[in-house]
Image (cartoon, rainbow, N blue to C red):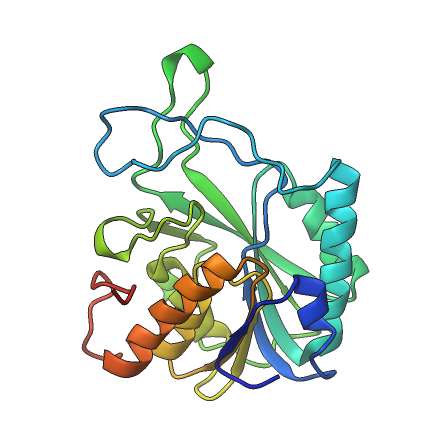
Amino acid sequence: MEMNQIYALSCLEGLKKLPDHSIDLIFTDPPYYQYRAQNIKGLKNHKDVVTEFEFDDFKSEEEYLQFLEEVLKECYRVSKPGASGYLWCGDDFVSFLNRMVERAGFQFRKVIHWHKTNPFPAVHPRKMFANSMELIVHFSKGTPKTWNYKSTNEMHNFIEAPICMGKERTIHRTQKPLKVCIPYIEISSNEGDLVLDPFMGSGSTGCAAVLEGRDFIGIELDEKWVDVARRRIAYWQAQVVPETLPLEMAVMAQ
């Protein structure tokens, strides 16, 4: 598989095409078994939220967890010794994933909390708090080889940033903002390293890799998102000077 490409394949199919010990960093956002949000008319900047539960075609929780375990085993195989991984997850499954990464051979290191400063509001009849947090499981293949220490305040397992809005926003429901992706790519890889995202989605990992001078390989099953991701990444590759462009600028080519 060539670097700086997105492949329209299933996750496991794509992973099996990669050679052993070839990846410096894994940064990925797999499907959550259960995604929920509220559709609230009249809310500014919250236009594409759904009411239904989505189960990502998994028939059961057990099937979902088995799938993730197979993915993590392949991720371990393709990772170089000392490589780090970052796996997005919901709070329902974080305890499973902590143990799962270790069964795959990795060392579990820490859970990182992303606080969304503009979460979808809670709806009163549901009697639930607003879902303002998402989690990232950090793991590594042995002791991390790369650890680019930043300032003390930037090395917490907590980050605050809004969900994608304005020009950065695509129609992908779970798009991750570059402001949340970039710090961990900076910390756990170096320029010229190869970053893998086996659930590429709308391409945020690839965009962040381009901004930080890393190479990437993306795998994405849905050709609609492959197209979106390719256009976003092409925008950065063709037009952006990483040191001078603010992250708030458009990341999707028209």
> In screen coordinates, is 113 left or right of 139?
left
Question: Image point 71% across, 64% down: which residue?
Answer: 12
Residue most extreme to the top: 125
Question: Image point 75% across, 36% down: which residue?
Answer: 60
Counting every numbered tag in the picture gives 0
> In screen coordinates, is 42 left or right of 103?
left
Q: Nearer the viewer, residue 197 or 6?
A: 6
Question: Image point 44% across, 82% down: which residue?
Answer: 214
Q: Nearer the viewer, residue 199 or 182?
A: 199
Question: Would you say residue 57 is visible in this rendering?
Answer: yes
Question: Image point 51% across, 85% down: which residue?
Answer: 193
Q: Tell me residue 17's x, y (percent).
A: 71, 78
Q: Tell me residue 222's x, y (percent).
A: 55, 57
Residue most extreme to the bottom: 192
Q: Tell me residue 241's x, y (percent).
A: 23, 82
Question: Would you say residue 150 is visible in this rendering?
Answer: no
> In screen coordinates, is 127 left or right of 56?
left
Q: Tell me residue 151's x, y (percent).
A: 35, 69
Query: Which quarter of the figure has residue 96?
Result: top right
Q: In which quadrant will I find the C terminus?
A: bottom left
Q: In which quadrant will I find the N terminus?
A: bottom right
